[in-house]
Image (cartoon, rainbow, N blue to C red):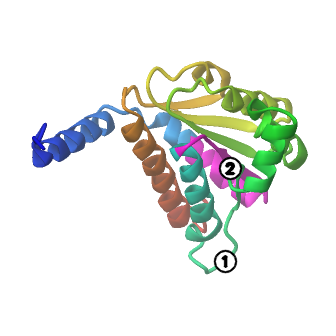
Amino acid sequence: MTEVCNPKEHFANYGVRLAAVLANADFTPVETLARALLACWRAGKSVYFCGNGGSAGNAIHLANDFIYGIAGGKGPGMRAHALSANSAVLTCLANDIEFAEIYSTQIKVFCGPGDVLIALSGSGNSPNILKAIEAARDMGMTTFAILGFSGGKAKALVETPIHFAIDDMQISEDLQMMVGHMVMQWLKQNACQGE
């Protein structure tokens, strides 16, 4: 088996591409997200995450971090929910209604004004993500999306897009987690400081 490329070169190139995106990023919308989540937390409202594939896994990971990580066990965390977490609900809705409605249907049941939706998407064009954003807007939620590639239709649909123009799904998914972790640490530092 002939080696196509040198692994060390590939790994170094990956790191360079990720670092370049971060170096050129506008973190203003991330600050908007952080402040919206702090207000949400203090008001006892909830944040909901959704995504597909790796982004669905990221949604579950970030919900865990916001429930526990921001308070570190020293107080109540944020009411955080991953709409991708319940496989029984997802398969029921996909089978009985349609896959495009798996998140919007849950939003109509669980959510209300003052809650926050964070949609995670590489392309920003998945029908279930777009319908989730539309449902969240109809419910009076504050909407965010962390997006890669061109940002897709979601970029114009949410109130605050956090867009990284990188045509690489794995780096797009890395950036979802990085934004989530940045905001989580900021919330942990500022939870009791009246920021």
Residue bearing mark 1: 75
Q: Is residue 45 left or right of residue 75?
A: right
| Residue 96 image position (x, y, % from top left) | 87, 38
Q: Amino acid at mark 2?
A: Ser
Q: Amino acid at mark 1?
A: Gly
Q: Is residue 7 left or right of residue 129?
A: left
Judge by depth and name the residue closer to the eye, 57 or 163: 57
Asked if 163 appears above or below 76 in the picture, the reply is above
Instruction: Identify the magenta region.
Output: 33-53
Judge by depth and name the residue closer to the eye, 190 or 106: 106
Asked if 149 appears above or below 39 in the picture, the reply is above
Q: Secondary structure at mark 1?
A: loop
Judge by depth and name the residue closer to the eye, 83 or 62: 83
Of circles 1 and 2, which is in front? 2
Q: Quadrant of residue 159?
A: top right
| Residue 134 image position (x, y, % from top left) | 77, 27
Q: Is residue 70 visible?
A: yes
Q: Is residue 195 visible?
A: no
C-alpha distance separating marks 1 and 2: 26 Å
Q: Residue furthest front?
A: 1
N-terminal of the pair, mark 1 or mark 2, is: 1
Q: Secondary structure at mark 2?
A: loop
| Residue 124 image position (x, y, % from top left) | 57, 26
Residue bearing mark 2: 84
In the picture, the quarter occupied by the C terminus is: bottom right
Estimate how packed mark 1 is, as few (under 14), some (14 to 19) or many (20 or more) residues with alpha carbons within 10 Å: few
In the picture, the quarter occupied by the N terminus is: top left
Q: Are marks 1 and 2 in contact (CB under 8 Å)?
A: no
**42 drawn magenta:** yes
Residue at the (30%, 31%) spot, across then down: 24
| Residue 107 image position (x, y, % from top left) | 82, 42
